[in-house]
Amino acid sequence: MRYRDPKKESDLLFPFDQETMSLVVYRQAEQTVLVQVAWSLKNERTREREIRSLIQADKELKNCRQLIVTLDETASLAGGTIEVLPLWKFLGLDE
């Protein structure tokens, strides 16, 4: 599904592949941003699934900012190419 805001040069994409259902893609200025959402990355299977989805999307879209939004975790993954942010920080709120 694709949503295009007619007032802005931005796209919001929701891939239909079941494994990447939470992946959101949007454009921020000149950069494409990939966002995965997970409650937590403490489970290795979940962490690997979320990383794999971002890497696959970045291969297609090229040079994207890659984020995983969680409830309360912060990290840098995949050699620093994937940023893990807690929801409050992603939304720009104070802790």
Image (tube, helix red, strand yellow):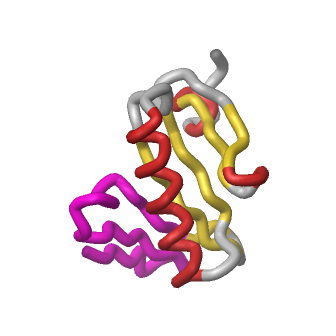
State whether residue 34 is above or below residue 79. below
In the rendering, at what x and y percent does residue 43 appear? 43, 29
Give me the residue at 72% from left, 41% from top. Answer: 76
Residue 21 drawn in magenta: yes
Which residue occupies the foreground of this view, 39 or 6? 39
In the rendering, at what x and y percent does residue 24 appear? 42, 60
Residue 87 drawn in magenta: no
Magenta segment range? 1-26
Give me the residue at 29% from left, 59% from top. Answer: 19
Which residue occupies the foreground of this view, 71 or 89? 71
In the rendering, at what x and y percent does residue 23 appear? 40, 59
Quarter that holds the C terminus: top right
Q: Which picture quadrant has residue 93?
A: top right
Taking the image as shown, residue 31 lies to the left or right of residue 40, namely right
Q: Residue furthest top?
A: 95
Which residue occupies the foreground of this view, 93 or 65? 65
In the rendering, at what x and y percent does residue 53 appear? 45, 61
Which residue occupies the foreground of this view, 57 or 10? 57
Q: Residue furthest front?
A: 44
Give me the residue at 64% from left, 81% from top. Answer: 62
Taking the image as shown, residue 61 lies to the left or right of residue 17, namely right
Give me the residue at 23% from left, 70% from top. Answer: 16
Quarter that holds the N terminus: bottom left
Q: How many marks?
A: 0
